[in-house]
Image (tube, grey):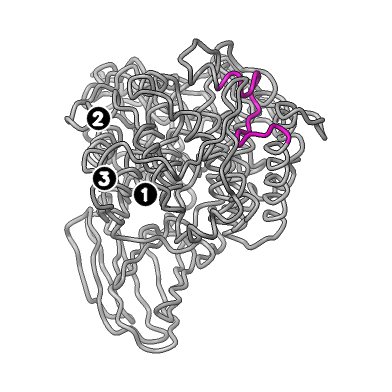
Amino acid sequence: MPKTPCCAGPSRRDLLGGAGAAAVMAGAGTMVWPAFALAQTAPTAPARPARLKPFDMANVTLTDGPFLHAQRMTEAYLLRLAPDRMLHNFRINAGLQPKAPVYGGWESEPTWAEINCHGHTLGHYLSACALAYRSTQDRRFKQRIDYIANELAACQDAARSGLVCAFPDGPALVARHINGEPITGVPWYTLHKIYAGLRDAATLADSNRARHVLLRLADWGVGATHPLSDAQFEAMLATEHGGMNEIYADLYAMTGTEAYRTLARRFSHKAVMEPLVAGKDLLDGMHANTQVPKIVGFQRVYEETGDDRYAKAADFFFRTVAHTRSFATGGHGDNEHFFAMADFESHVFSAKGSETCCQHNMLKLARLLFMQDPQADYADYYERTLYNGILASQDPDSGMATYFQGARPGYMKLYHTPEDSFWCCTGTGMENHVKYRDSIYFHDDRSLYVSLFVPSSVRWANKGARLEQTTSFPETPTTNLRWTLRAPVEIALQLRHPRWSRTAMVRVNGRDVLRSTAPGRFVEVTRLWRDGDRVELILDMAPAVERAPAAPDIVAFTYGPLVLAGALGRQGLEPGADIIVNERKYGDYNDGAVAVPDIAGDPERLAERVKPGGGPLEFTIPAADGAPVRLIPYHRIAHERYATYWKVQPVTA
């Protein structure tokens, strides 16, 4: 999913330079609509800038560890893909000859009858290349971005329209949808990915050509939807449309064009928003990842308008999903849908739980909320889901990614093929592992927040400061920080005391300076820092048990932020059996009978039976028959069967 711009964008003059008024195609007709001439539809309150800013990813460096490994695997995959194959259907819709055959899977044939997402991968790919370029400054990614942007510009010129799309029927399908006619497809969902990819190409890779294409597409969207009444617009939003409100809020932030802010409001689905504003959880049965991008957009609309209703909706949704609807891994849902938590036992063991796209988008939301209100609760959720959802989603050997990460006992992670299964989670998977740098450190005018314990460093140019973080976390519950400074400087260092750690000790230059016994907050160390000063944060981690209130005899084991999975071996698995084409068949692949150990005992006291094993982050727990069950972090599980939840058997006399 797309990434919200992390730093100040170009000026309105720079962004609009040369764009002019876009040609707008709606069905067979063509009209010209000057987007920036439209009046806004409602008064706007003052915008609410975030309290914290992320550091530019170009100023953050990852050092050796699992996150850097995952990034490098994705970088290699991005460079193996051929842009012309992703551009195939865009050129066809524009009346141009394709330059290469189209990729398979979602890019050529609809995976299921009523939906097609042709073209979505190109948007994700643009975002991923922009993130990779910003992180590494490897010009190969910038070259691909500019090439794709030039090709999309050629499509716009050939079609004489700002619209670029790859799904069947192209502009005619969009026109029917806008006109309220029945359609087969989700055009705005797919277009959202193109908008987001171009946005990221413009803001993160500074691609002028991508800016030009984006502005033409943005103005097309304004003109094409302008004739709709509010009721007609709301009816259109009943079809999945990604985070179109987020995109137009971002466009407003980039350009100051009032029509974009107006459209951000109009793309905010009121049927979903209003119950959330009122504090009502009506999510049961709703398609999960249709909703999460809308909520990300609610938060962005709040930030650009100051309208508190959007903020209330976003925060209530986050707390509802993160605290009452999530699994131990931070994922949620069964077969892509929210379910009633009273029915937890009926859904927890599904092979189709925890769609990876949902975790991707929930982290986007958590990040935005954290920057607005830097509470450790958001960062704790981010950490838990980052390890057990995002890092866990990548095959460490091939770089491919998961769709679902279900908890069916004895099942396994299934990964996409390189060229024939371009799922939505393939696209977000391209982005996930090249943006780890964006949420480790944040700052305001006086404070530097260390939100994640990841081997890395950050440069704060305005302070003449560099902070290096050296850690083997989560193998050891400590992290070490060292300042490199041009001159002494006063900075408030904010260190997260996670909820999973009973205590936090801070040492400066070897001396104890602070002890916290209140988990779930940031602890502050403010002083005049000098070059070479060292800070050590010491936490504690212990095995624990997590249960859902509706099913207290179903447990997951955790260690700090990590979910511990039973490593159950490769029974019935041939090499490569977990690389699959069709995500709809999760649960059918490799579905032979597998013996899964029983766990018995008092659920309240099971954590006491988890003992250290033979290596770092390895544990054992006795099964009901006394045999040891090996437990390792879920994010390290690959190419073998596992269990993350266990239905605890009563102890028999």
Q: Amino acid at mark 1?
A: Arg
Camera-side mark, 2 or 3: 3
| CA gap, disc 3 and disc 1 | 24 Å
Neighbours of disc 3 within 10 Å: few (<14), some (14-19), many (20+) = few
Q: For the residue labelled by badge 1, is the local secondary structure a helix, a strand or a loop?
A: helix
Q: Quadrant of the C terminus?
A: top left
Relative to 160, is 619 above or below?
below
Q: Residue at x 54, y 27 (%)?
A: 412
Where in the figure is residue 163, as x and y percent of width and height? 60, 33
Neighbours of disc 1 within 10 Å: few (<14), some (14-19), many (20+) = many
| CA gap, disc 2 and disc 1 | 33 Å
Q: Looking at the image, is mark 2 or mark 1 earlier in the sequence?
A: 1
Camera-side mark, 3 or 1: 3
- Could you say which is closer to the camera, residue 228 or residue 57? 228
Q: Looking at the image, is mark 3 or mark 1 earlier in the sequence?
A: 3
Which of the 4 image quarters holds residue 603?
Answer: top left
Q: Amino acid at mark 2?
A: Pro
In the rendered structure, the answer to whether residue 295 lies left or right of residue 568 reads left
Of the numbered discs in the image, which one, if any, rests on residue 44?
3
**Residue 602 visible:** no
Q: Which residue is mark 1?
A: 367
Relative to 503, is 544 above or below?
above
Of the numbered discs in the image, which one, if any, rests on residue 603?
2
Q: For the residue labelled by badge 3, is the local secondary structure a helix, a strand or a loop?
A: loop
Which of the 4 image quarters holds residue 327?
Answer: top left
**Residue 599 visible:** yes
Where in the figure is residue 298, as x and y percent of width and height? 33, 38
